[in-house]
Image (spheres, helix red, strand yellow):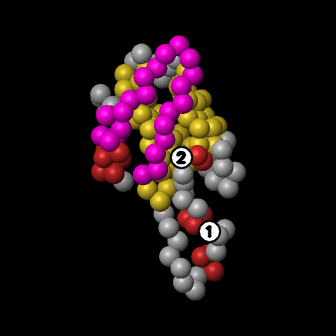
């Protein structure tokens, strides 16, 4: 998963979200989906956690100044794990599980990668704090 996250981070370094004095939506991209393998397993129905891959519209992520806000839009996702990495230093700024929404102040200016992981897959995005 670490190699995959580094690849996703490198992909998004080329298209940063430049900030102004207003709230900016962070573009999220689906990077992995966990698919259910059909068979005789009773968990193979549509209620299985992996049968609904995570999609960009499942979450809304914004940056307003230096405040990152993530809101879950899809009720069928029970929880998500958000990780923010400083792209310059590689240091993890935030690594937190949430169920509905998350708001976090990012203290240091720089380029950041956002990684949202659920049972159904993962999304990545990038933003800049000035």
Q: 56 or 49, which is in the foreground?
A: 56
Q: Quadrant of residue 108?
A: top left
- Looking at the picture, does residue 13 appear above or below residue 46? above
Q: Name the residue that disc number 2 marks.
A: 56
Q: Badge 1: how crowded within 10 Å, few (<14), some, or many (20+)?
A: some
Q: 117 or 38, which is in the foreground?
A: 38
Q: Badge 2: how crowded within 10 Å, few (<14), some, or many (20+)?
A: some
Q: Name the residue that disc number 1 marks.
A: 48
Q: Report the span colored magenta.
A: 9-31
**Residue lying farthest to the bottom in this orientation:** 40
Q: Which residue is pictured at 33% across the width and 51% down the height?
A: 4
Q: 89 or 56, which is in the foreground?
A: 56
Q: Name the mark nearer the viewer: 1 or 2.
A: 2
Which of the labelled discs sits on residue 61, or is there none? Answer: none
Report x, y in % for residue 97. Answer: 56, 43
- Looking at the picture, does residue 76 appear above or below residue 124? below
Report x, y in % for residue 68. Answer: 54, 27
Report x, y in % for residue 93. Answer: 43, 31
**Residue lying farthest to the top in this orientation:** 21
Residue contact at pointers 1 and 2, CB within 8 angstroms: no
- The C terminus - image quarter: top left
Q: Which residue is pictured at 59% across the width and 38% down the height?
A: 60
């Amino acid at each position: 998963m670490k190699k995959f996250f580094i690849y996703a981070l490198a992909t998004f370094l080329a298209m940063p979200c430049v900030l102004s004095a207003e709230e900016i939506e962070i573009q999220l991209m689906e990077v992995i989906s966990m698919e259910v393998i059909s068979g005789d397993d009773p968990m193979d129905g549509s209620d299985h956690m992996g049968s609904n891959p995570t999609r960009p519209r499942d979450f809304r992520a914004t940056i307003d100044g230096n405040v990152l806000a993530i809101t879950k839009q899809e009720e069928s996702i029970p929880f998500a794990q958000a990780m923010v990495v400083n792209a310059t230093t590689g240091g993890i700024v935030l690594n937190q599980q949430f169920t509905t929404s998350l708001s976090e102040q990012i203290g240091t200016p720089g380029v950041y990668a956002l990684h949202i992981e659920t049972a159904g897959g993962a999304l990545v995005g990038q933003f800049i704090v000035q």
